[in-house]
Amino acid sequence: MESNTDFENSKIYITADVVEYVANSVVIKTILKKTTGNISLMSFDSGEGLVEKAIPFDTFVQIIDGKAEIVVNGISKFLATGDSMVIPAHAVSLVKSNGRFKMMQTVIKSGYE
């Protein structure tokens, strides 16, 4: 996994172009990282995903290219480009891919100190 926080303030980016697909990999580029939360862009090659986990913070995800399956507390949700959802704090979630996709993830830590 790759992480990068070299984003210039006030510069315009095409979100889906910021992170590239890499064969057999999940690529993560961090746009903003603060004590109150972070925003990351991720690309997933076909068959790749994130392990099942629960985090103590609300997480907003938006698909910016392709289609993904996100499982929250055992319930599958299928999202396509432009779709988004909130994964509530402490929910057990899993991200799966049946094909390549990209997503933006925003974690909000404020209010949980």
Image: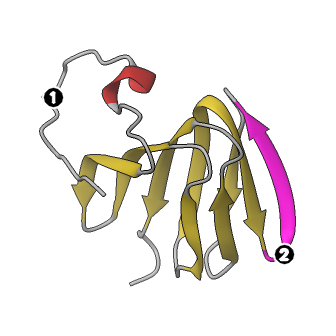
Q: Residue at the location (61% across, 36% down)?
A: 63
10 Å crowding of disc 1: few (<14), some (14-19), many (20+): few
List x then y, in percent, for residue 84: 68, 41
Position of 60 relative to 102 (above/below): below
Mark 2 lies on a secondary structure that is: loop
Q: Amino acid at mark 1?
A: Asn
Q: Quadrant of residue 88?
A: bottom right
Residue 75 within the magenta-colored segment of the rendering: yes
Task: Specify the label residue 74 is tagged with.
Answer: 2
- The span from disc 2 to disc 1 (Cα, nearest Å) is 39 Å
Q: Of the residues shown, which amino acid type is indicated by label 2?
A: Gly
Q: Give above or below for 11 relative to 44.
A: above
Q: Residue drawn 54% across and 65% down?
A: 50
Q: Name the spot of residue 68 as percent of width and height, x first.
A: 70, 44
Residue 17's disc is: none
Query: Which residue, as the protein is rendered here, is positioned at the far right?
Result: 75
User: Which residue is at 34% across, 56% downward?
Assistant: 38
Residue 9 shows which numbered tag?
Answer: 1
The reply, left or right, for residue 91 in relation to residue 8 is: right
Q: Helix or strand or loop: what does disc 1 sit on?
A: loop
Left or right: where does residue 29 sit relative to residue 104? Answer: left
Percent position of residue 2, x then y: 25, 53
The magenta-colored residue range is 73-80
**Chief secondary structure of the magenta portion:** strand
